[in-house]
Amino acid sequence: MEILLAIMTGVLYAAGIYLILRRSLVKLIIGIVILGNGVNLLIFLMGGLVKERPPLIPEDGKMLEGVFADPVPQALILTAIVISFGLQSFAIVLIKRAYKVLKTDDIDTLNKTDDIT
Amino acid sequence: MSEHLTIYPIIVHLLTAILLLLFWMKPQVQRYISILGSAVGIVIAVLLFQRVWENGIQSVQLGNWEAPFGISMVADTLAVTLILLTNIVAFALSIYSTETMVSSRVKFGYYAIFHFLVMGLSGAFLTGDLFNLYVWFEVIIISSFVLLTIGGRKIQIEGAVKYFTLNMISSIIFLTGIAMVYGATGSLNMAELSRIIPEIENKGLMATISLVFFIGFGVKSGVFPLYFWLPASYHTPPAAVSALFAGLLTKVGIYAMIRVFTLIFPLGETNQMILMIISALTIFFGGIGALVQKDVLRVFSYLIICHIGFMVGGLSLFTEVAIIGAVLYMFHDIIVKATLFMMGGVFYRIFGHTKMENMGGLMNNYPRLSLLFAIPLFALVGIPPLSGFWPKVSLFSASYEQGAIFMLIVFIFASLITLVIIAKVWNKTFSKNPTTLPRQKNLRYFDQFSIREKAAFIVPIAMLVGVTLYYSFFAEHFQLIATRIGEELMNSEHYYNAVFKTKEVTEL
């Protein structure tokens, strides 16, 4: 299972970076979204996978015993997902606006702000 | 209650921002609230600074979860000094925004977002947890996206696309680094990491992770191959926004770099080498870039990059004196760069544009204003006794003592190229005769302003110039602060003891 998720993380990173390198604004945003998912999966994987042992203290116990799933990465992912959700929705509005104002979807033509004049 | 003073700098700006949201459609009320909030921010920053100066590093465990399980907020001397400077700049910009920000922009929540940004900066300086640092970074960048695009002019949107993309990628790289650190150590508390990391045997892995962090922070601070978003976007928003960005946003990247590379991953020889080369390239390309630009705001943007090289260079030498130099340079740079972009706003109101070819004659037409503007420009070059000179003393002597002649040459080159650039700016904007262009119809020019409007432009600039002058003539105060910062940064046990409240705290 770990090896599968590790490969999956790699695939997501590769796909994200590939899409970011394309010339289209829409693909750029999709690339960032995929890259964001890749990093969430990486955090999840880095916590270590433990099957069917949620970090819950049994009713008659005082503390967790034995091997249990690490709750911290899950909390981190939850935070990261919420943040990237906000940023991505902003990004989508931004490219929609950019398309309206600049009338182009081609990143190569976005060089107005770099002209030396 | 008073032990929570550490997190008040965050809360002040949060409350101010929330209060501002309640007065959404009332720009005039918002202006007063913003100035008031920033003033309270300064008071609290001063109180916190005094507390830390007298009692050593302060820490608060949020939600009363003992470190390393909860999130620690740690105020050491570096953090509080930066918070103090941030609040001073924010106060000046609150006043500056009263006239430069048109009401339509204010009605889109300019002031509220402005305070959320300052809150994010304070949080990033105070936090003692890596993941929390990421969260504050996100607070900062989401606020800066809005500030950058507010108004929605064509050029702003285009700059924002570039700014947005690179900052998102940098956050993702930073988060990757966090995931790797968590996987390797099982902790994200900076103080705890400072104890765990040296004991890990796989040094190669640690070096790799540290460089992942370097790339993440490098994009934020604008070091050599990663800076292209900066000159593409910083000249597009209104002057008040670019002043805030120029003064503080790149510096928070440098702050994170200094924090991570002193506390968590103390620089090894290879990393020092990498940082040195990158610092040299940053200075070189920033300087050359500034030299060829024709728009005064873009010259200033490239100067930001050029001077980031000083701070990275100081960090790369990694001796106490060099860190002191880097930190001193950062203090000087925050104030001066913010002033420069505020001056850019005044240029725009005087000439109606910021193209250097058609500017000029400031010295004849506005002699007193020129004198005021000369101070930050000369301070930037580092003409003694102005503020740029003092950090260079530490940086030069540190590189000489260490035998890093290469860095010495780089620093001297940077000073010279800054001098050439400033001389060019001075020639083209202050002394030569201007070409008169037809005036824009829907822009109010500086000579049409009433006294009150002029004051709103000039008083905040004068305030920051005052801080620069204070830095220049009472440099020993800043030297004293920086010396203490250097000592705290190079000995991570101070930080550790403050977070874990171990016995040694009382002995400090």
Image: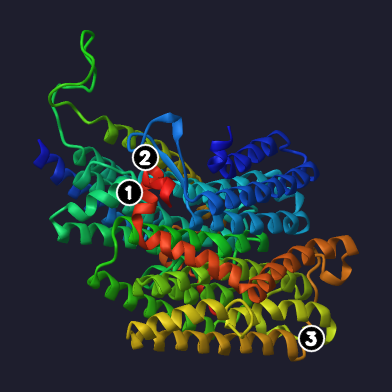
Q: Give the residue number, with chain letter if any, for mark 2.
A: A80
**B212 vs B476, nearest the viewer:** B476
Q: Amino acid at mark 3?
A: Met
Q: Residue B363: which disc? A: 3
Task: Tell me, yes or no, whether dots 2 and 1 are on the same chain.
Answer: no
Viewed as shown, does residue B167 lie left or right of B116?
left
Q: SS at mark 3?
A: helix
**Figure quadrant of the N terminus of chain B:** top right
Q: Position of residue B270 (x, y in %)?
A: 23, 72
Query: Vertical placement of A49 versus B236: above or below?
Result: above
Task: Name the residue tied to disc 1.
Answer: B175
Q: Label 2 to label 1, Cα distance in Å?
A: 9 Å
Q: Quadrant of residue B474?
A: bottom right
- Are the residues tagged 2 and 1 within 8 Å (C-beta)? yes
| Type of amino acid at the residue the image marks with label 2 | Ala
Does the CB distance between marks 2 and 3 fall below 8 Å?
no
Element type at mark 1:
helix
Q: Which one is nearer the viewer's eye here, B218 or B25?
A: B218
